[in-house]
Image: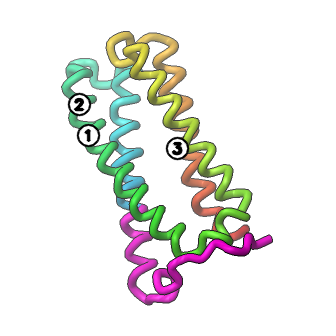
Amino acid sequence: MVISGLTGIPWIASNPIAYPALEVMHIFGIALLLGNLVLVELRVWGVAAELPIKPLARVALRLSVGGFALIAVSGLLMFASQPSELISNRTFLIKMVLIQLAGVNAACFHARDGLGRADTTARVQTLISTALWLSVMICGRWIAYR
């Protein structure tokens, strides 16, 4: 089912360089986001305990936010190339919900000072974070096949 009335920016999808470049930017953003999140999450679990968690998190989370910005910009432009097809794609919609859940989980983690506590709840939240972002990546790949 394609929703009529949503027009996109067709040159993005048809340009031999634009869409692949956006995909590369998207993947680079994913690497920055997930790589740095996992680094902080491992520290919450006690890995490399000699490293102070707050300074490590300050650097890693800035890089994660930068990665998310790359993902958002490239994702919005890729979405703009075919909005009606993506809005009607169940996997795309699941991906959007998972991203929102990851954001809520991150907000809850920081609101309760998960970095400072590094307790069982914080550890569970890191597992949820990793699971959600891996699920987002799986959905992202699956979109092309649905």
**Magenta span:** 1-26
* Cα–Cα span, label 2 and label 3: 20 Å
Frontmost residue, 119 versus 110: 110
For the point 41% across and 64% down, the residue is 74
From the image, tell me which residue sits under label 3.
133
Rendered view: 89 above or below 53: below
Q: Closer to the camera: disc 1 or disc 3?
A: 1
Residue at the spot 68% in from the left edge and 74% down from the top edge: 5
Residue 42 location in percent, x, y? 38, 29
Q: Where is residue 125 in the image (x, y as percent from the top left)?
A: 51, 24
Residue 15 within the magenta-colored segment of the rendering: yes
Residue at the extreme front of the image, as rendered: 5
**Gap between marks 1 and 2 measured at Cα:** 6 Å
Residue identified by numbered label 1: 62
Residue 88 sits above or below residue 44 on the image: below
How crowded pointer 2 is (Cα within 10 Å; few <14, some 14-19, many 20+) is rated as: few
Residue 20 in the image, given as x and y percentages of width and height: 43, 78
Few, some or many residues within 10 Å of mark 1 (<14, 14–19, 20+): some
Who comes first in sequence, dot 1 or dot 3? 1
The label on residue 58 is: 2
Question: Circle 2 — which element?
Answer: helix
116 up-or-down from 28: above or below? above
Residue 142 has which mark? none
Which quarter of the rendered picture does the N terminus lie within?
Answer: bottom right
Instruction: Give yes or no for contact between labels 1 and 2 (Cβ–Cβ under 8 Å).
Output: yes
Q: Which amino acid does label 2 sit on?
A: Arg
Task: Please name whichever residue, 9 or 104, is drawn nearer the observer in this view of the structure.
Answer: 9
